[in-house]
Amino acid sequence: MNLNIFGFSNPLLLQRPRLIWLQIGLVLNKITAPKFGPRALGNRSILADALSTEMQKNLNLKVKFRESFRPFAPVILEEDVSQWFDFKGSSPYMLMVDGLKSEHRITLSDQQKGLFGIDLLNVAKSKIAAVTHVDYSARLQTVSQQTNPLLHALLTKFKELTGVGVLVNTSFNIRGEPIVCTVEQAYHCFMGTDLDVLVVGNLVLHKSAQDKNKVLDGRSQFELD
């Protein structure tokens, strides 16, 4: 494959300028060794800006190729989780659901309270709109320096940039497809969706720098659920 690749020393983009990708809503991917369990926990994941009010819809429609209402989960610094949610402790496997603290909730107007379905879903419920459910809950993944030092470092840098140590974390695949397990699978998923950046180890691929003739249509490979 003829790829335009940018190399850098840290596989999680710890330089401050590179984190602007996440701040403007672009998507970061990383792939390492396989694992097992019901969730992607940051090694074969799509990570994105949780602050964006459009991120949930965009990830669903343009990356996952599924219904826009599907929820996403946050990955958050373990030391910050009790500041944001009614939860203390660790949830390293994204299995705990808890409510957002009242001080972080956006109170709905009377008009908004009368909305239903997608219209209600599209109303921002908090500053971390992309991972806040309509009932102000979220399925949490906490990360400590011990459990995943690189992901913890990325969240810490993102917090320095935005004031919030929270990102969207969803599995690195599209609807109907298993999570990527090889570099080739990661590349095909990247080229077949609207992902903008692919990170594999110490290498970075920008979609804008790739051969447009190699762009795939991921929607044609798998039937709807």
Image: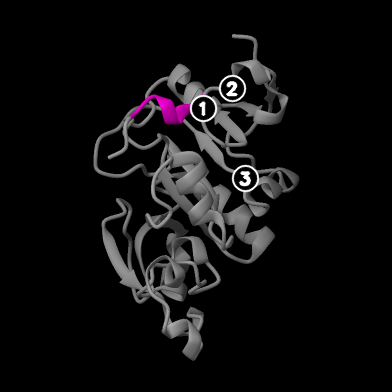
Q: Which residues are magenta?
A: 217-222
* Type of the residue with mark 3: Leu
Q: From the image, which quarter does the C terminus lie in?
A: top left
Q: Do the CB atoms of the residues marked 2 and 1 lie less than 8 Å apart?
A: yes
Q: Quadrant of residue 195?
A: top right
Secondary structure of the residue carrying numbered label 3 = loop
Relative to 56, residue 6 above or below? above
User: Which numbered dot is residue 26?
Assistant: 3
Task: Please report the residue visible at 45 percent of the width from the left and 61 percent of the height from the top.
Answer: 131
Residue at far top of view: 1
Instruction: Look at 51% across and 22% down and name the residue there.
Output: 187
| Residue 88 appears in view | no
Residue 164 picture location, percent across and down: 58, 65
Residue 64: % across, % down: 43, 41
Count the labels in the image.
3
Report the mark closest to the observer, 2 or 3. Answer: 2
Q: Amino acid at mark 2?
A: Val
- Of the two numbered discs 1 and 3 on the same chain, state the one appearing first in sequence: 3
Residue 134: % across, % down: 38, 71
What amino acid does circle 1 point to? Answer: Gly
Residue behind mark 1: 192
Q: Are marks 2 and 3 in contact (CB under 8 Å)?
A: no
Q: Which residue is mark 2?
A: 215
Mark 1 is surrounded, within 10 Å at the Cα level, by few (under 14), some (14 to 19) or many (20 or more) other residues, namely many
Q: Where residue 74 sits in the image (x, y, percent)?
A: 43, 58
Query: Does residue 189 appear in this view?
Result: yes
Which residue is more in the foreground, 81 or 24?
24
Q: In the picture shown, does residue 133 fall above or below 65?
A: below
Label pair 1/3, CB-CB below 8 angstroms: no
Residue at x 57%, y 63% (from the top left corner): 53
